[in-house]
Image (cartoon, rainbow, N blue to C red):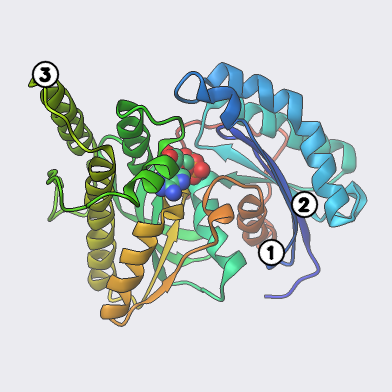
């Protein structure tokens, strides 16, 4: 699938302002990520209005740096790919407005990218994975089990009915006094804990859908009742036990989906896939069933624009472009852009 193609990717759907240059759908020339985490941390989570304002402040600088690091100018770009949804509407609008203006001024085609599809495509940047495969996308806003039939064709096999896996990590972390974003903090704390110390319920065991709000409530109830009884609990043990329950749920459903589709390849995507324990358990389970396992490096698991450029590449080679009427779509389904 070699073409002479350079895509500028732009991502502003949540709290990372990112721009990247990706050549021929394979080579990352630059991937600049400006994280707003320090700004949002004191509020315990992302404040949408603050996120939008910070994207506006940073977007020019981030795109400039991405072009400089790739050693190209707008004239060298084949197309501009931008996240059009899902995400925070005000945050998305900053990237979309910037990409439209740049596409118009530089006379370049514009490509609308679905954020979750882009997370899946991060795998193509770090391996020789090709469809079909099963992908578990677990992030702060989404938990989807997807059958990737082709580079631009996806079937959703299961999804969360309530909280996303990352959201559960963030809420449990907050309850035990860890800063935002909680996933990585829980992982660090869990390293000193015993994962079998506490038993929490795993919901919807025999279903392809997920539910994490029951688990989150069970952990919060445990913390409250322990405190009310004047007892102590071990934070590392709690972090490890919670992490293990999430990991086992994600792994067992992803492996079942592979069996159901008779598929021999499984991939991880999204911020939660940065978790070492989830990566380890998924690899172990996949290998025991003769399933090949793929996961991007952590920098390509969390939000970044290289994955946006990568997803845009597959639209580019099919000539699928967006018009300047492109809007931001905060709740758009996969396949709808
Ligand atoms: O994909 P992402 O960067 O943004 C969204 O599209 O949501 O995912 C962010 C989520 C947060 O909930 C964060 O706590 C979680 O991914 N996360 C992790 C880890 N690193 C990030 N969760 C568990 N373990 C990690 N190491
Ligand atoms: Zn994301």
Mark 3 vs mark 1, CA separation in Å: 61 Å
Which residue, given by chain and number where applicable, does mark 1 sit on?
317
Q: Residues within 10 Å of mark 2 (few under 14, many from 20)?
A: many
Q: Is residue 95 left or right of residue 135?
A: right
Kindly report the distance in space between the C-alpha atoms of the residues bearing marks 3 and 2: 59 Å
Which residue is outermost to the left? 229
Q: Residues within 10 Å of mark 3 (few under 14, many from 20)?
A: few
Task: Please name whichever residue, 224 or 255, is drawn nearer the observer in this view of the structure.
Answer: 224
Q: Secondary structure at mark 2?
A: strand
In the rendering, which numbered label is found on residue 228?
Answer: 3
Q: Is disc 1 in contact with disc 2, using a CB cutoff of under 8 Å?
A: no
Between marks 1 and 2, how big is the CA–CA gap?
A: 11 Å
- Taking depth in this image into account, of 163 and 190 the one nearest to the observer is 190
Q: Earlier in the sequence, mark 3 or mark 2?
A: 2
Q: In the figure, is residue 329 to the left or right of 159?
A: right
* Disc 1 residue crowd, few under 14, some 14–19, many 20+, Cα 10 Å: some
Residue 319: quadrant of the picture: bottom right
Location of residue 27 by image quarter? bottom right
Residue 210: which numbered mark, if any?
A: none
Q: Is 24 placed above or below 45 here?
A: below
Q: Is mark 2 within 8 Å of ligand 2?
A: no
The residue at the far bottom in this view is: 290
Instruction: Determine whether label 3 and label 1 are within 8 Å by CB.
Output: no
Q: Which mark is residue 79?
A: 2
At mark 1, the secondary structure is loop
Tell me: is circle 1 under 8 Å from ligand 2.
no
**Residue 200 higher or lower than 206, as above or below:** above
Identified at 22% across, 62% down, the residue is 252
Answer left or right for 258 relative to 135.
left
**Front label number (3 vs 2):** 3
């Amino acid at each position: 699938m070699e073409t002479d193609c350079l895509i500028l990717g732009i991502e502003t759907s949540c709290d990372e302002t990112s721009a990247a240059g990706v050549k021929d759908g394979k080579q990352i020339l630059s991937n600049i990520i400006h994280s707003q985490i320090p700004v949002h941390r004191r509020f315990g989570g992302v404040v949408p209005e603050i996120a939008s304002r910070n994207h506006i402040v940073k977007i020019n600088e981030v795109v400039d740096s991405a072009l400089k690091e790739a050693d190209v100018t707008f004239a060298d770009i084949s197309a501009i790919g931008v996240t059009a949804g899902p995400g925070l509407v005000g945050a998305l609008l900053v990237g979309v407005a910037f990409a439209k203006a740049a596409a118009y001024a530089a006379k370049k085609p514009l490509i609308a990218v679905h954020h979750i599809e882009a997370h899946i495509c991060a795998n193509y940047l770090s391996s020789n994975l090709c469809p079909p495969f099963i992908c578990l996308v677990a992030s702060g806003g989404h938990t989807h089990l997807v059958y990737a039939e082709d580079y631009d064709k996806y079937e959703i096999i299961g999804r969360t009915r309530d909280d996303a896996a990352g959201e559960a990590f963030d809420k449990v972390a907050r309850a035990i006094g860890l800063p935002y974003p909680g996933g990585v903090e829980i992982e660090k704390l869990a390293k000193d804990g015993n994962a079998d110390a506490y038993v929490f319920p795993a919901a919807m065991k025999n279903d392809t859908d997920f539910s994490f709000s029951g688990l989150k409530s069970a952990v919060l109830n445990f913390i409250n009742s322990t405190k009310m009884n004047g007892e102590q609990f071990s934070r590392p043990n709690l972090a490890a036990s919670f992490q293990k329950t999430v990991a086992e749920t994600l792994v067992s459903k992803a492996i079942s989906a592979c069996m159901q589709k008779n598929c021999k390849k499984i991939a991880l995507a999204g911020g939660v896939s940065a978790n070492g324990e989830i990566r380890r358990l998924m690899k172990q389970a996949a290998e025991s069933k003769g399933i090949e396992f793929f996961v991007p490096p952590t920098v390509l698991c969390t939000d970044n624009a290289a994955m946006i450029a990568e997803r845009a590449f597959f639209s580019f080679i099919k000539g699928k472009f967006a018009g300047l009427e492109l809007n931001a779509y905060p709740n758009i389904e996969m396949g709808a852009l």
